[in-house]
Each structure stands twice: as structure tokens, then as C-alpha cells.
Image (cartoon, rainbow, N blue to C red):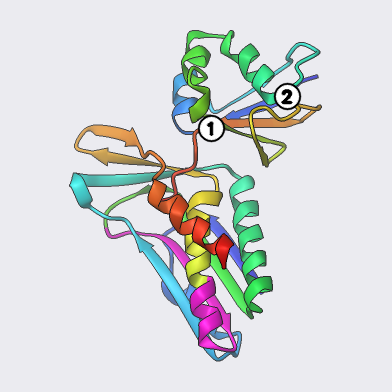
Amino acid sequence: MAIDLLYFSWVREAIGTGAETLDPPEGLASVSDLVDWLATRSDGHARAFEDRARLRAAVDQVFVPLDSPLGRPREVAIFPPVTGG
Amino acid sequence: MIRVSVQNEPIDVAAEFAVLANGGVGGIATFTGVVRADDGVSALELEHYPGATEAALRALAEEAVERWSLEVAAITLRVGVMHPGDLVVFVGTAAVHRAAALESCAYLIDRLKTEAPFWKRETRGDRASWVEPRDGDLDAAARWSKI
């Protein structure tokens, strides 16, 4: 099932694109599992997802911890902590 | 009434204020954030998550309207490339009495800095860097959960 992936800030820059549509393998249980799979796709992905403590995620625009169940989302966004200050 | 805008265009404070003043209320409080030039910053860029940023700001405004019985809550965030002196955010609240307007205005600016998804990149000379989250902002947002 295809998922729209969105990346922001330095995650986007490391990967080299702000959006891609991918068809991950079945059986990814959590958002973290999805990130593990994404990290294998390129050197840029690996670099962007190296330090999990610096990553945040939203599933279908709802902010969730990385260990949340993935479910069957249409859209997953991965990004650094927000910096409004 | 709630008005939320995320825009590339400059913030028009007079137009923002007019929305609040039309509420026919007793008190209006506003906060306007201005791009600082500290440490030689020559440009500030805000990146946002289209759709999710607007939804987060709307949820905050709805919370404030409920908690302080506001007549109007308005939040406008400018995104894209800005320069020192440009207005980056406007928050306005209108209520029957001043305490509700003042408190809710402070609440909205504290919370939106930690809860709305946007990211800042500062340019100094020919170097651009992403801003790291600041503990002070988290502390400012956290104080509202204790009241």
C-alpha cells in the first residue's frame, strides 16, 4: 500500500526531497519500523534518520511518538522538533 | 470567531486589528513577533507543514476561545524568507474584559512556539543553519498546564 512520505527542515535536505510516494513492505508494525526501512533506501535517508532522538513524526497529520503503531496511513511526515522560538 | 492564516505575504497589522475590533468587545490584546538581527542574522526562513500547521494553530485558538470565553482569537504566521524588522507572527485576542484578552494572548504565543509544526533557518553572511529547539520555549509553554 503506497504511503505519501513528507520530510521537513534538515531531514528534507539530507534526503534531497520533501516528498515521495513509496510502497513499504507488509508487516511494519510501528512508525519506527517504517523509519528503519526508509533508512535503507539511500545514504541521504540513512543520514537523515541516524539520530532517532532528533526525529518527530506525524501520521495522517496527527503527531505521534516514533514507537506508535503505524496502521495503514495515507501520509507520514518525519521532521526535527519544531523551532518556533 | 477564529481566524487563522499561514501566509507568504507580509502581515498587515491594521487589517489584523480591524478583525479584532469588529468584535464589539471590551478589551483587545495583541502580540507581534519581529525578526531579530541578533548575532548578525541577515535572513530568517520559516518552513511549515501545509495543512498540519493551520490545523495546529486552529486547535490552539479553539482552546483559547473555550478557556477564556473569547469573542475573537486571531493567529497569523508568515512563512518563507524574511529579514530583520519583518513581522513574523501576529496573535490577537478580544474579550469582554482585559484579563481574559491579555492572558489568552500570552497563552497563544507561548503554545504556538512549541506546538505548531514549523522550522526556522537563519542566514548569517553566506551560512544558513537550522535553529535548534530552545528549552526556554518549552518552559514557557509548560507553565500554562499548571494554571
Asked whether B127 or A63 is in front, the reply is: A63
Determine which quarter of the picture holds residue B24: bottom right
Name the residue located 67 percent from the left edge and 27 percent from the top edge.
A67
Chain at tag 2: A
Residue B99 shown in magenta? yes
Disc 1 element: strand
**Position of B73 relative to A67 (above/below):** below
**Upstream in sequence: badge 1 or badge 2:** 2
Q: CA distance from mark 1 to mark 2?
A: 16 Å
Q: Position of residue B68 (x, y in %)?
A: 62, 76
Asked whether B106 or B34 is in front, the reply is: B106
User: Circle 1 is placed at which residue position?
Assistant: A79
Name the residue located 38 percent from the left edge and 44 percent from the top edge.
B45
| Kind of residue at disc 2 | Ile
- How many C-alpha atoms fall within 10 Å of the one at disc 2: few (<14), some, or many (≥20)? some
Chain at tag 1: A
Disc 2 element: strand
Name the residue located 57 percent from the left edge and 13 percent from the top edge.
A39
**Position of B5 relative to B136 (above/below):** below
